[in-house]
Image: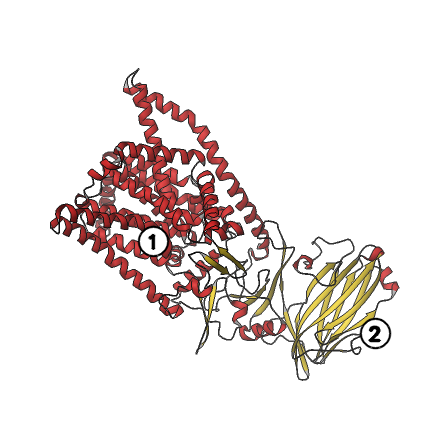
Amino acid sequence: MFRGAVGDARDALDRLSARIRSAALDHPERVAAAGLVLGVGLLIYFLAIDLFPYHSVNDDEGVYLYQAAMLLEGKLFLRPGEIPFEAVRPWFFVVDGTDSGVRMYGKYSPVAPAIFAVGRLLGDWNLALGVVAAGTAAGVYWLAAAAFDRRVGLLAIPTLAGAPLFLLTSATFLSYAPATMLNVAFAVAYVKAARTESRVWAVAAGTAIGLAFFCRPYTAVLFASPFIGHTLLSLGVVWRRRGLGESFSVVFTRALAVAVPGAALVGVTLAYNVIVTGDPLVFPYAAFAPEDGIGFGPHEILNYERNYTPALALETTVTITQEFFTSWVPAGAIGTGLAAVGAGATVWRSRGLQRVRSRFQPASGLRDGEVAALLGAVVPAVFLGEAYFWGTHNGLRNGLIDLLGPFYHFDALVPVAVFAAAGVAAIARRGVSVVARWTTTHYARLVVFVALVASAPAVASAELAVVDGPLAANERRSENLAATYEPFEGRSFDDAVVFTPDPYGDWQAHPFQYLRSDPGYDGAVVYATDGGPERDLRVLNATNRTPYRFTYRGTWTGATTPVTPKLERLRVIEAASVRAETSVGVPTEATSASVRIETPEGYARYSVPTAAVDNGNVTVTWSIGPETAQVRNLPFESGSRFRDVPLASDRAEVDLVVTFVGVGGSSVTYRQEVTVDGRGEGVRAVWPPETRVCRLTTECGYDGTWVGPDGDYVRGIAVETSARGVENASRTAGLTSVP
């Protein structure tokens, strides 16, 4: 039996191999197309893992991946439970209060996340990006072959892949490439349905555009508008020529087969709106920012607002059109020129619009010229339609378009790639025709081939010129992101909670989108934005996990410049009181020093002996009790009340401030901030404190964070600190203590 099974398997493989060889001999261009399509998918996959190992600086990627992870767990909402939602609210998530507690949902529809989730099911999120890119390339090949021929289809694949916009946007977890894949699938199915009068293909077309609408409604409407116009024109022409006869029935049935599944999925979109926002006409993005969206007039998202006028729309459209056709299409201006040649050759071949109209036979299917016309109409539909949307202006303002290209116009790459490929073919055909006047066709083809090969370096140089800039810019940011996440490399967590910085406010995964909690907040690690003492303690109480603090020294600039990161284990000291000792180095040229204990209720100032300053090291012994904090080893000098500074409440912050002053008034201040929880006769303190080293000011942000002796400081800077509980055993309330 085993031998028989092996023999059957071998026979099946032999038959498959024979079919492949037969296909390669009978249809070599299809085999070549399959190879090119596979190559495009692999290129995008490897670009994603090599250029964007920590994702791009467009933090929307984290939103889509969060939603994808939620779908894999069967969730449409995040429910933080007892964890303060402000600490774990992901970027671009809407907060919605219900009777069962707070729930949060993503700003975007679930279609693109569902596509990305397929990659995770296959073993690697990035595989989904390769599949989407390959699917789009396959559709572009078919459309180019339908509009021209299979040789143009083959040329269209590498032409598409040569566009910097295609390369960079396809390698990111954003919805633009998946939406275009669905739009292209719609176009392919629409043409097949028109040419074969197949209702199956018509239903496929409607399903594809319906999913595209669910994914990106406005994008789908713009792409589909030429096809909708073609359908209406077809119905009108047939009715005028032949009345309500069989021909009209054919076209009408085909249109209905497209419209019904499309409308059904529009209904699904509206139903999803009801589930998440409670209103079928309120999309999640509008629930997040009601003044965001299409149309002229005042617009606002988060802290940015602008009156989007027609004049501003015109200015934005002119700018983006210039950028698109000179910097983001294949080979830049050369690619644009080739597309213009292809479009011109198409019009010339059709012998003008009047002849196109006379040949228009909607009942008999789409002719080549009509397919080309539909594709060409996508370009003005996209650019004119997007002029009505202020997002392009916003993308230009925040610099994301400079890095990833005009992603709102991603659909326009499809006709550009097709017509550029047609332009190459037209130039080659015309060249052969001209040269053949003086020689044979065979030698004419050889001459044109040599000319094309000779021009390849110029085209490659133009391609390198448009690709090199954005690739280098993104590579530089990825290197800085790699340095930022270095403490997490090779680090595994077990039941941890990691407090993260907040350069953009209370947003998780913004800007650190690589750090994401599991949707149920029940994974190995929960990431929480660092906040005030009360919130941080609520996070610790709610999670009951081993705490860590992730921070950095420097100014966050969207990864354009590097920062110095630090990840440290925390412990919660619980005792009757906490006794701490802090030793700091004396900065070069410092002549005097003072020490303060600060709480929201007041401060106490202590004097530092000159001998300690001259010795190069100042040691402060201080204590925190359930009601007060004080310095114990230095003389009290002055304060808002007494030597002991009262705590503001049960949950507060205690700051130790050591300031050194030098010649000319220059100063360096060490500031240690401790989160404390006074509880009756005892106190809890989160240790070690956040430590900052500030120049010329007593308070500073992340640019002064102490990250250890390897940081960039003035000479003489050093920090050593320790703490212990007294009158009670130091313990961690369910958390493991560290030295």
Disc 2 packing (10 Å; few <14; some 14–19; many ≥20): some
In percent of width and height, residue 203 lies at: 23, 54
Q: Nearer the viewer, residue 615 or 159?
A: 159
Q: Mark 1 falls on what kind of element?
A: helix
Image disc number at residue 221:
1
Q: Which residue is mark 2?
A: 636
What colour scheme has been applied to the protein in the rendered image? secondary structure
In percent of width and height, residue 426 lies at: 32, 30
Disc 1 packing (10 Å; few <14; some 14–19; many ≥20): many
Q: Nearer the viewer, residue 648 or 490?
A: 648
Furthest residue to the top?
438
Q: Amino acid at mark 2?
A: Phe
Q: Nearer the viewer, mark 1 or mark 2?
A: 1
Q: Residue at x 51, y 42 (%)?
A: 471
Q: Nearer the viewer, residue 680 or 84?
A: 84
The vertical placement of 442 against 503, above or below, is above
Furthest residue to the right?
611
The vertical placement of 605 against 391, above or below, is below
Q: Nearer the viewer, residue 229 or 215?
A: 229
In percent of width and height, residue 665 lies at: 82, 58
